[in-house]
């Protein structure tokens, strides 16, 4: 069975565009027109930065899912 790939998802309906994710993991997130967007997808090498951005975001708009 193939290994599942981790994907960063942002719920734009919940996102408040505060930029906390971009401040924490600037290679992965940026704010466009008041909404956070994913710049590049999950890389296990940057797991700590990505998870810090997800857990530090003030609303539950960012998640890491397996596909």
Image (spheres, rainbow, N blue to C red):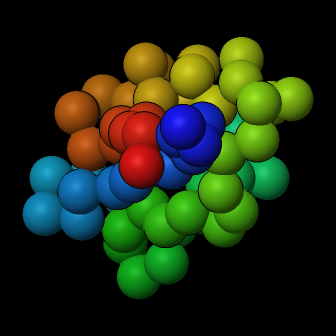
Q: Residue furthest front?
A: 1
Depth order, front residue of 51/66: 66
Identity of the residue drawn at 43% across and 19% down? 55
Horizontal side, residue 35 vs residue 23: left or right: left
Horizontal side, residue 19 vs residue 44: left or right: left
Image quarter of residue 17? bottom left
Position of residue 59 relative to residue 10, above or below, is above
Identity of the residue drawn at 77% across and 30% down? 44
Horizontal side, residue 62 vs residue 25: left or right: left
Q: Residue furthest right?
A: 45
Position of residue 5 relative to residue 31, above or below, is above
Q: Residue furthest bottom?
A: 33
Residue 14, given in percent of the width and then of the height, sits at: 15, 52
Horizontal side, residue 51 vs residue 25: left or right: left
Give the total number of marks visible in the rendering: 0
The image quadrant where one finds the N terminus is top right
Depth order, front residue of 34/62: 62
Identity of the residue drawn at 66% across and 45% down? 42
Residue 39, given in percent of the width and then of the height, sits at: 66, 67
Residue 15 seen from this side: yes
Image quarter of residue 12? bottom left
Residue 9, given in percent of the width and then of the height, sits at: 39, 53
Residue 18 seen from this side: no
Residue 34, given in percent of the width and then of the height, sits at: 37, 72
Depth order, front residue of 17/7: 7
């Amino acid at each position: 069975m193939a290994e599942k790939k981790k994907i960063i998802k942002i719920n734009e309906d919940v996102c408040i565009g505060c930029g906390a994710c971009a401040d924490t993991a600037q290679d992965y997130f940026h704010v466009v027109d008041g909404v956070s967007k994913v710049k590049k997808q999950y890389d296990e090498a940057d797991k700590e930065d990505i998870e810090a951005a997800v857990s530090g975001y003030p609303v539950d708009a960012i998640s890491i899912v397996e596909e």
